[in-house]
Structures are given as structure tokens and as C-alpha cells.
Image (cartoon, rainbow, N blue to C red):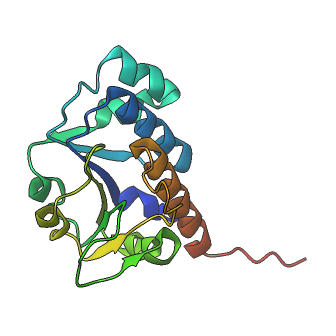
Amino acid sequence: MTQNPLDSIRIVLVEPAGALNVGSVARVMKNMGLQHLVLVNPQCDRTSEDARKMAVHARDVLDAAQIIPTLPEAIAGCQRVIATSGRDRTLPTDLDPPRTALPWLLDAPSALIFGREDRGLSNDELNYAQRFVRIPSNPEYPSLNLAQSVAIFAYELAQSAVDCQPKLHVTS
């Protein structure tokens, strides 16, 4: 049996403030076959009724979420790290669309980092990543909810994992 390439990917939330978002993230992760949720210095209680209500049948993902004090500890052991950004920045590298960048995570222990709901990741935090991604959105209102962003990235990861699986050839 072939190992699921999604098993080596961590979804890392830096200082999430909303229990509803954390529960929703757990749910969408389970929907798309991801299981490793890491919360860096969370500002909410992942065990709260709000988080559990939003997780629905993904309470196992929520309960297994690791609570880590710092971003470097959260990504320890990862060979590939992609950071998300909701806005253009003055970075020495491009912000790639998810479909282009995410397949790169499938070949090694990896992390996909999401920033705070209100301000995203700091420039110092972005320095921990080798690549950066951004969801192309309406320039008049580019900000997406954290759980919505994770949903888009999780879907793209799941599709990339399906695309990289060896195809079975049936002969009659």
C-alpha cells in the first residue's frame, strides 16, 4: 500500500485567535485528508465548545492538534516550508498561486504556515519559509477568513496528492 503524501504535511496556525476558526480548520483538514494540525501559541481554547461545534466529525484532528510555543519549534524536522500571505509584500521572491507551489510539499516532511487572523505573518516569521503562496483574489477585498484560506489550500493539496499517485492500468 502506498503512503498518503498528505501524511507528512503539517498545517501550522500561528497564534490563532478564534476557536470557531480552529474548529473549522480541523473540519476542512479532515475533509481533504490532512491530519497534522499545529497551533503556535494559540490565543483561544481548541477544546472549547465553539471549536468542537465547528469541527463536527473532525474532533479527532482537533484533539490531536499539537500546541507549540514558537514557530521554529512547530516546523522542526520539516524539510520544506511554505508560508501564506494575504497581501503583496516587498519580498525578494514571488508569491506563487497554491496550485503551482503546493505539489512541492508532497515529497518530504513539510509545513504550510498560516498567520494570525487580523494581521497574518510578520516578515520575521516569513523568513522561516522557502516559498510563499497567495490566493489570487479580488483586489477590492482580498482578505479571506483563516478557515476559508485553509480550505482552499487543503483542497489544492488533496488534488495534488491525487495527481501524483501512480495510476493503475487495467488490461482485459
Above/below status of 26 relative to 77:
above
Q: Which of 164/168 is in front?
A: 164
Q: Which of 166/109 is in front?
A: 109
Q: Can residue 1 be seen in this view?
A: no
Report the residue that reaches farthest toward the front: 140
**Which of the 4 image quadrants contains residue 93?**
bottom left
Point 52% across, 62% down: residue:
137
Point 38% across, 19% down: residue:
50
Above/below status of 119 relative to 43:
below
Report the residue that reaches farthest toward the top: 49
Point 23% across, 78% down: residue:
91
Above/below status of 47 relative to 151:
above
**Which of the 4 image quadrants contains residue 85?**
bottom left
The x, y position of residue 55, in whole percent, is 45, 28
Q: Which of 61/14 is in front?
A: 14
The x, y position of residue 26, in whole percent, is 42, 37
Report the residue that reaches farthest toward the right: 172
**Count of residue discs:** 0
The x, y position of residue 82, in whole percent, is 31, 68
Q: Which of 105/25 is in front?
A: 25
- Determine whether, in the image, residue 65 is placed left or right of residue 53: left
Point 52% across, 72% down: residue:
99
- Determine whether, in the image, residue 126 is placed left or right of residue 48: left
Q: Is residue 139 visible?
A: yes
**Which of the 4 image quadrants contains residue 61?**
top left
Question: Which quadrant: the C terminus?
Answer: bottom right
- Determine whether, in the image, residue 56 is placed left or right of residue 91: right
The x, y position of residue 157, in whole percent, is 50, 62
